[in-house]
Amino acid sequence: MHATMKFGFPFLQRFAHTGLMGLLGALLLGGCASGVRIDTTYNSENQDSRAQFLVLHYTVGNFESSLATLTKPSNRAVSSHYLVRDDPVVTYRLVDENRRAWHAGPSFWGGYSNLNASSIGIEIVNAGPVVGADGTTRYTSFSQAQINEVVALCKEIVARHQIRPDRIIGHSDIAPGRKQDPGPLFPWKRLADEGLIAWPDAAMVAAKRPLYEFQLPDAKWFQGKLSDHGYNTSHSGEWDALTRDSLISFQMKYRPAKYDGRPDAEIAALLDVVNAPQGMVLSKAMDFSKPYTSRW
């Protein structure tokens, strides 16, 4: 019998057609299952790291509670890229650096907002502010070993992503009033001594201070200087809550011995210098000669 006679019956013809179409569909689906074939021959030089900011926090809790808060789902879920334990000192990576952690919340610094999308967050295990029996609030100090760990971690992150010194900031900087961490006992000057951030030139501050001893500038001047430095403060010309909160954050970093949110000659001089040309000094220059490559 000829081959053409095998499909002489209509139902056999339909079966042959359906079978061939099914086979063709399976082949097509099989080809799609492998995904798009990406050619990586070319690599643009016009790119940089997603991470443009490094934000430091304290956890306000012990290690166990901090770890649970940063890793378990909740109605107010938060996370960070790193958690630095206090005792023993251990650094845990909780979120890959190439992914967005939920640590900054509503935030602003130097013209940029929503910093979760462009930052790496480090949470430092620390009790934060503690109210004593006398009703006085006292901040919890950091151990030297823990700070050494934080400094080393910051250096590695900065080298990987080439983060600028003025973009290594505290949670209180990007959310003044709402947040106070890492608090007045965090040693920002140590980060300056390590070349991670710039620090106000002491000689310039000393020279500027007498200019403000007799009369302080008005609120609008302070607001302008805080804004120029990076804070999302108001420009009302009044000593409103946001202005005082921003001033407290600034004081906690550069003059932690007194952080009352009130203007004085020393703070005016500091604000003048941090915004002046050559006013901020880097003790060391970070080596950005090597291109960014992910450690992981």
Image (cartoon, helix red, strand yellow):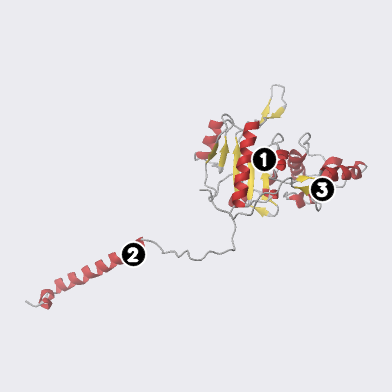
Relative depth, front residue between 139 and 98 = 98
Between the residue at mark 1 and the residue at mark 2, the CA separation in whole angstroms equals 52 Å
Tag 2: Cα neighbours inside 10 Å, few (<14), some, or many (≥20)? few
Name the spot of residue 204 as percent of width and height, x first. Answer: 85, 46
Q: Residue furthest right?
A: 214
Residue that appears at 53% across and 64% down:
43
**Circle 1 residue:** 179
From where the camera sits, is residue 48 visible? yes
Q: Please tell me whether mark 1 or mark 2 is closer to you in this view.
A: 2
Q: Amino acid at mark 3?
A: Val
Please give left or right for residue 85 compared with residue 235 in the image.
Answer: left
**Circle 3 residue:** 273
**Circle 2 residue:** 31
Residue that appears at 79% across and 34% down:
258
Are discs 1 and 2 less than 8 Å apart at CB? no
Please give left or right for residue 235 compared with residue 163 in the image.
Answer: right
From where the camera sits, is residue 268 visible? no
Q: Going from the N terminus, do you reach mark 1 or mark 3 first?
A: 1
Q: Going from the N terminus, do you reach mark 2 or mark 3 first?
A: 2
If the image is split into quadrants, where does the N terminus sit?
bottom left
SS type, badge 3? helix
Between the residue at mark 1 and the residue at mark 3, the CA separation in whole angstroms equals 25 Å
SS type, badge 2? helix
Vertical side of 122 occupied by 53: above or below: below
